[in-house]
Image (cartoon, rainbow, N blue to C red):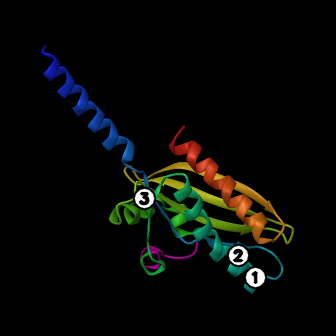
Amino acid sequence: MTLIKFNAIIVLLLILLTIEAKAQTRIAVLDFELKDLTLKPGIPAEISRTASVKPMLENELAKSGYQIIAISADAQQLVTAGTGYLFDHHDVAALLGKKYGADYIIVGRLHKPSFLFIYLMAHLIDVNNGTLAADLLTEVKGGEKKLTLKGVEDLAVKINKTIKP
């Protein structure tokens, strides 16, 4: 093999490796649902906290190098047959993610069994095969925004460990 052919092969391999390295995993994060089991369910502060989880999680995942795929609340609502439906029907959530070109879709829930703590629950669904890749849970004690952010950061770490072991 001549030196020119060898160099051309090396250059082609480097180009292919560069293209592969730049291919980002695409993740869609749906709006989190509030499941409030307390004696005063659905207070405005809890609704606001629940709404803040999606953008915080998208931000954390983007920092980890994932491409965030936007799916509107309206598109999510069109395929939802009721509260918790997408959380329980991974195949339907996967179809929604596939429609928007995602590799994974995250269906989340803010579960509040007490005034003292919440659980951030997330189903990481593999869009290609419509199955649950991970059932993730993080406990957050207290209602301050910084504590919710810490819980979201923990959730992002768990997602990252699942996708990139």
Kindly report the distance in space between the C-alpha atoms of the residues bearing marks 2 and 1: 6 Å
From the viewer's perspective, is 107 left or right of 155? left
- Element under disc 2: helix
Q: Position of residue 63 (x, y in %)?
A: 55, 56
Range of residues picked out in magenta: 76-83
Q: Are marks 3 and 2 in contact (CB under 8 Å)?
A: no
Point 58% across, 70% down: residue: 55
Residue 82 magenta = yes
Q: Disc 3 marks which amino acid?
A: Asp
Q: Position of residue 108 (x, y in %)?
A: 59, 64
Kindly report the distance in space between the C-alpha atoms of the residues bearing marks 3 and 2: 28 Å
Q: Which residue, given by chain and number where applicable, does mark 1 sit on?
A: 45
Q: Position of residue 77 (x, y in %)?
A: 47, 78
Q: Which residue, given by chain and number where applicable, does mark 2 sit on?
A: 49
**In which quadrant will I find the C terminus?**
top right
Q: Which residue, given by chain and number where applicable, does mark 3 sit on?
A: 91
Q: Disc 1 marks which amino acid?
A: Ala
**Residue most toward the front?**
3
Residue 33 magenta = no
Quick one: 1 or 73, which is closer to the camera?
Answer: 1
Going from N to C along the chain, the mark reached first, 1 or 3, is 1
> Would you call the spot at circle 3 few (<14 residues within 10 Å), some (14-19), or many (20 or more)?
some
Q: Position of residue 28 (x, y in %)?
A: 46, 63
